[in-house]
Amino acid sequence: MTTVGLLYPGHSAEGDYPRIEALLTGVNVPIVHTDIGEDAHRVDALLEMGAPARLAAGTEELRLSGAESVVWACTSGSFVHGWEGAHEQIRGLAVTAGLPASSTSFAFVHAVREVGARRVAVAATYPEDVTELFVGFLEAAGIEVVAARAGGVVTAAEVATWGPERVLELVRAADRPGAEAVLVPDTALHTVGCLPELEAAVGKPVLTANQVTVWEGLRLAERRGAWSTELGALFARKEWDGEVGEPAGE
């Protein structure tokens, strides 16, 4: 049994994680909910959401769960700090938890490399300014963003109400012929139940926040044998126009 510990802000789409757990063999995904503070996709609120004290509050519970790695399961609450700031955030988390640590933002970087993509499209629920920060984060990692769609949603609570049809609409609107993968960066969005449909619709890997978060925790725990055809190309070892690449450490 491999145990991946998650720090998840508030309550929105955490139901995706038991679904992933059920589709993988020998994987346990305990969740500790952190204080979300103000539910707003606004830069000042996001910076506070990912503050060290908020993350540190849940680390003892994760250690007691037997976690072998810990992932800050929040994209906007990590990339909003910028490339260097996001590194500093996970370094602090690793020291506090005493475990290998990462965040959903870095999970996207590693997952893009894993599926062999270099050019991506971004299908974000966020407002335009927050979406642009995610694009900048990806570009700092050497990933070319060929298109970005901003959904303009301000709160995680609203994002959590989206059904599969609306997610599919966003992914299709964001996709471009030059993109080798489509990224959906919001852990408040339910996506795990429709990953095969999303990939079938655009004919390429679709990487979603809750999916890549668990994959990143498994990568940190050096568990490379957890696969499921229901969890998209990232978990299926499926090749799209080339060989799957190895993730690079940060």
Image: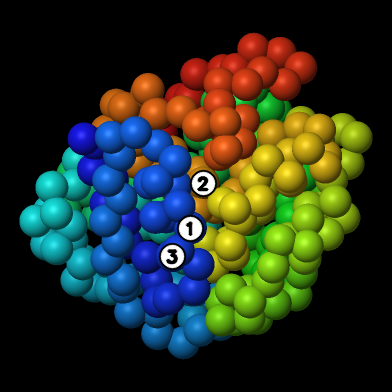
In the image, what residue type sits under mark 3? Glu
Sequence-first tag of 1 and 2: 1
Above or below, 50 relative to 144 = below
Quick one: label 2, few (<14), some, or many (20+) residues within 10 Å?
many
Q: Amino acid at mark 1?
A: Asp
Contact between labelled residues 3 and 1, with CB atoms less than 8 Å apart: yes
Q: Do we see residue 146 in this rendering? A: no
Q: CA distance from mark 1 to mark 2?
A: 8 Å
Q: CA distance from mark 1 to mark 3?
A: 5 Å
CA–CA distance between discs 3 and 2? 11 Å
Query: Is tag 3's residue or tag 2's residue first in the polypeptide sequence?
Result: 3
Residue 36 position in % (x across, y down): 40, 79
Label 3 secondary element? loop
Give above or below for 97 relative to 142: below
Residue at image position (69%, 34%) is 205
**In the foreground, 62 or 127:** 62
In the image, residue 6 lies at what x, y percent? 32, 56
**Residue drawn at point x = 58 percent, y = 62 percent:** 190
> Which label sits in the foreground, 1 or 2?
1
SS category of the residue bearing label 2:
helix
Looking at the picture, does residue 176 appear above or below residue 161?
Answer: above
Task: Name the residue beneath numbered marker 2.
Answer: 211
Q: Percent position (x, y) of residue 55?
A: 27, 66
Q: Which residue position is annotated with label 1?
A: 16
Residue 163 placement, left or right of 160? right
Whether label 1 touches label 2, CB < 8 Å: yes
Label 1: how many residues lie within 10 Å, few (<14), some (14-19) or many (20+)? some
